Image (cartoon, helix red, strand yellow):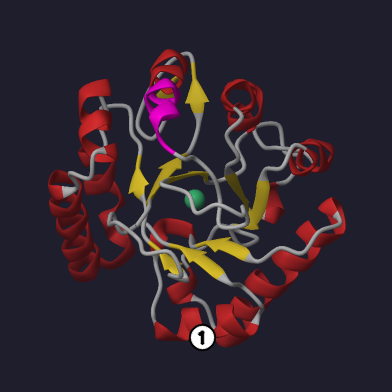
Amino acid sequence: MFLALTYHSIEYKKSGYTVGLELFRQQMEKLAAFRVGTMHDPICPDIVITFDDGLISSYRFALPILKDYKYKAYFFIPTGLIGNTRHISAAMLQEMARLGMVIGSHGITHKLMTGLTNNRLERELIDSRSELEDIIGEEVTSLSLPGGGYDCRVISIANEAGYKYIFTSEPRLNDIGDRLIGRVTMRQGMTLEKFESIIGGNLCLNRTRYLFLFLIKRFLGDGYGFIRRLLIK
Ligand SMILES: [Zn+2]
């Protein structure tokens, strides 16, 4: 069994999905007792660290700390944003891949994939993958679903597009061999005590919150953004 964690940005200031730099360092320290790694390692990991959205803060602030602890992590990149002022550049991606970080796709435009036509969905999945492969010169087989949204059609097209591991936002423990991998999202309100409880396997609160968001999303469609923003404060 292993637990996967999702980070977005790491900054000095914390807000929403941003985790403060000092708290991030303390969280990484707590993971020293575990095997931290990826599915590409010869030894199965206990904890998998992932970063969504390709934000430059994950390169600038999180990468040096990961290097200090010799942790390998996944970085999921929306390829349409590569090189924007707030986003990781192609040269940074090459550097990260050389350091053993796993680069994965987060689509092109970061649109919720369940709302796209088959044709558009194929472009998001296939073109983002080939662009990343061209940049890092390695096969890309991991995908994180923007907004965590998926259905049978999205998974089936992602499989056809060559993805072996698909990361969702459903907080749960995963079995080695799972191809659909649930993750716990790290937010500003995640104290070190809560973090320790989660890495100890207590996902109760996170699962309740996820179920609540899932139901709101189902009833309100994409108009649930306002409630979601309230909930992550
Ligand atoms: Zn995202």
User: Does residue 137 appear left or right of residue 198 in this picture?
Assistant: right
The image position of residue 186, as x and y in percent, is 35, 37
Question: For residue 158, which quarter of the picture?
Answer: bottom right
The image position of residue 8, as x and y in percent, is 48, 38
- Vertical order, 115 against 227 (above or below): below
The image position of residue 144, as x and y in percent, is 52, 59
User: Does residue 11 appear left or right of residue 182 in this picture?
Assistant: right
Query: Ligand 1 within 8 A of label 1's CB?
Result: no
- Give whichever of 165, 77 is nearer the camera: 165
- Give whichever of 123, 36 is nearer the camera: 36
Residue range of the region highlighted in magenta in the rendering? 27-34
Residue linked to disc 1: 156
Q: Residue at x 61, y 73 (%)?
A: 163
Q: Residue at x 71, y 42 (%)?
A: 100
User: Does residue 102 appear left or right of residue 204 in this picture?
Assistant: right
Q: Residue at x 48, y 79 (%)?
A: 155
